[in-house]
Image: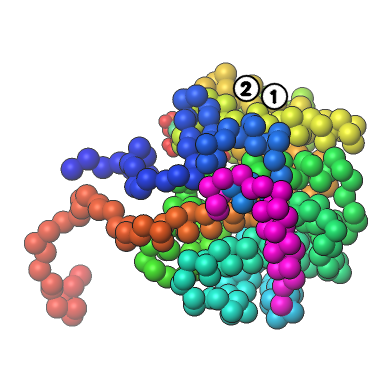
């Protein structure tokens, strides 16, 4: 029996959704290279592509856009639930709880027909943005902002978190960031979602589980951790000593390294451009420059490359978004990939049940409780 810790290099299923070549730094959604998608399609088109396997026509994306917009509102009870939570609760935990509750307002929550899965995917994708925006505003003690259907998914999301209509550059940056984070093959949260879906549980349970997995700093939580690190360092000329001290303590530098990519993560290639564009716009490239310096040192010393979370941190922060909202933003995008995988899993389902190598004792005999020392 060969044990593969972390299931590395174990092929658990076949998929038509996404392909990664970790040695070439290549990421493909449904046959399209991520650089091509990032530069040429909207998040709505990406969502359609992930769910339906091909890029939409104008009529098809307009139809999806209409359906997403019709589902943007969230029930008052969900807002009240978020308001009732402790303000110190982690926003990803708030999101997990709110999305779980949302299920009781979905007329299809217990409908397992294929068409119902698509309807739930639309609802979840539309409402995830509104729930995240509500969490953001409530934690900041601000009034909620109702969705504006004249805006795209990315534009409306920024509007709901920031309370003012975003300019074209910010909307485009968020739109590209959403496309870049939408899908990533059998990452930890998607795998979690597929495992839950494979038990023939329901779509909401699968998504709630996926949110829980995404929260962790070794996965989606890394983007928040990167910004916390940059804020802790504070200044470009303190980067070297900070990284040296972290390395000496064998501390991981968040946003660096990847389980699959052994070269530059292609999403980081796109995000560094967004980070630079945003920085130059607001005449503050400090966070980008610090990130680049951290990257250079860690690459020289450990041969590691930045992943998706490394430059999304400086991009979002420069856009005025608070660091602890970065991981929920990841969920606003990744819900599209999660649901694509849940739909695919259920189209040829097999219960996911790996094995273990047992290394504990055998043959022990129970000693009566009173006699155990
Ligand atoms: C993503 C990650 C979990 C993948 O790791 P992996 O391929 O399973 O590799 P491991 O965690 O087992 O690490 C292998 C070695 O590289 C080192 N390493 C990996 N990532 C590192 C990092 N970010 N900083 C410093 N050292 C790192 C480990 O300490 C380990 O060193 P060792 O062999 O001397 O003990 C890991 O790179 C990491 O924790 N990165 C930081 C978190 C992060 O950014 N997550 C988001 C991923 S998209």
Task: Give the percent coordinates (x, y) of residue 326.
Answer: 69, 50
* Callout 1 crowding tier (Cα within 10 Å): few <14, some 14–19, many ≥20: some
Residues at discs 2 and 1 in contact (Cβ within 8 Å): yes
Task: Give the percent coordinates (x, y) of residue 65.
Answer: 72, 57
Q: Which residue is mark 1?
A: 293
Q: Where on the picture, by quarter, is residue 318?
A: top right
Quadrant in which the C terminus appears: bottom left
The answer to whether residue 345 shows anywhere in this view is: yes
Task: Give the percent coordinates (x, y) of residue 215.
Answer: 57, 55
Q: Where on the picture, by quarter, is residue 352?
A: bottom left
The answer to whether residue 88 shows anywhere in this view is: no
Lateral position of residue 366 relative to residue 100, left or right? left
Looking at the picture, tell me which residue is in the foreground, 44 or 132. Answer: 44
**Residue, x 46% and y 72% (percent of image)?**
112
Examine the rendered structure and indicate whether residue 204 appears above or below residue 107. above
User: Which of the numbered marks, if any, corresponds to residue 297?
Assistant: 2
Lateral position of residue 217 relative to residue 201, left or right? right
């Amino acid at each position: 029996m060969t044990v593969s810790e972390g299931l590395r290099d174990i092929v658990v299923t076949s998929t038509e959704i996404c392909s990664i070549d970790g040695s070439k730094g290549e990421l493909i959604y449904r046959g399209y290279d991520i650089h091509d998608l990032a530069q040429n399609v909207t998040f709505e088109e990406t969502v359609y592509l992930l769910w339906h396997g091909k890029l939409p026509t104008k009529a098809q994306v307009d139809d999806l856009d209409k359906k997403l917009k019709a589902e943007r509102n969230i029930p008052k009870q969900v807002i009240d639930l978020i308001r009732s939570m402790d303000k110190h609760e982690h926003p990803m935990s708030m999101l997990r709880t709110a999305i779980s509750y949302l299920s009781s307002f979905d007329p299809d929550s217990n409908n397992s027909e294929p068409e119902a899965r698509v309807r739930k995917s639309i609802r979840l994708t539309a409402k995830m943005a509104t729930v995240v925006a509500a969490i953001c505003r409530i934690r900041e003690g601000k009034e909620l902002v109702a969705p504006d259907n004249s805006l795209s998914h990315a534009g409306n999301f920024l509007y709901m978190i920031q309370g003012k209509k975003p300019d074209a550059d910010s909307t485009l940056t968020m739109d590209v960031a959403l496309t870049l984070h939408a899908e990533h093959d059998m990452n930890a949260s998607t795998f979690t979602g597929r495992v839950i879906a494979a038990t023939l549980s329901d779509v909401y349970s699968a998504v709630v589980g996926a949110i829980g997995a995404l929260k962790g700093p070794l996965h989606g939580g890394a983007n928040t951790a990167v910004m916390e690190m940059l804020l802790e360092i504070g200044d470009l000329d303190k980067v070297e000593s900070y990284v040296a001290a972290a390395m000496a303590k064998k501390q991981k530098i968040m946003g660096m390294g990847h389980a699959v990519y052994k070269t530059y993560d292609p999403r980081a290639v796109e995000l560094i451009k967004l980070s630079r564009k945003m920085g130059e716009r607001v005449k503050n490239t400090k966070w980008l420059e610090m990130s680049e310096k951290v990257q250079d040192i860690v690459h020289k010393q450990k041969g590691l490359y930045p992943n998706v979370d490394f430059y999304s941190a400086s991009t979002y922060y420069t856009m005025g978004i608070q660091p602890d909202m970065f991981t929920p933003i990841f969920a606003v995008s990744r819900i599209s990939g999660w649901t694509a995988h849940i739909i695919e899993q259920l189209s040829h389902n097999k219960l996911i049940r790996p094995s273990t190598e047992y290394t504990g004792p055998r043959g022990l005999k129970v000693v009566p409780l009173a006699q155990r020392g």
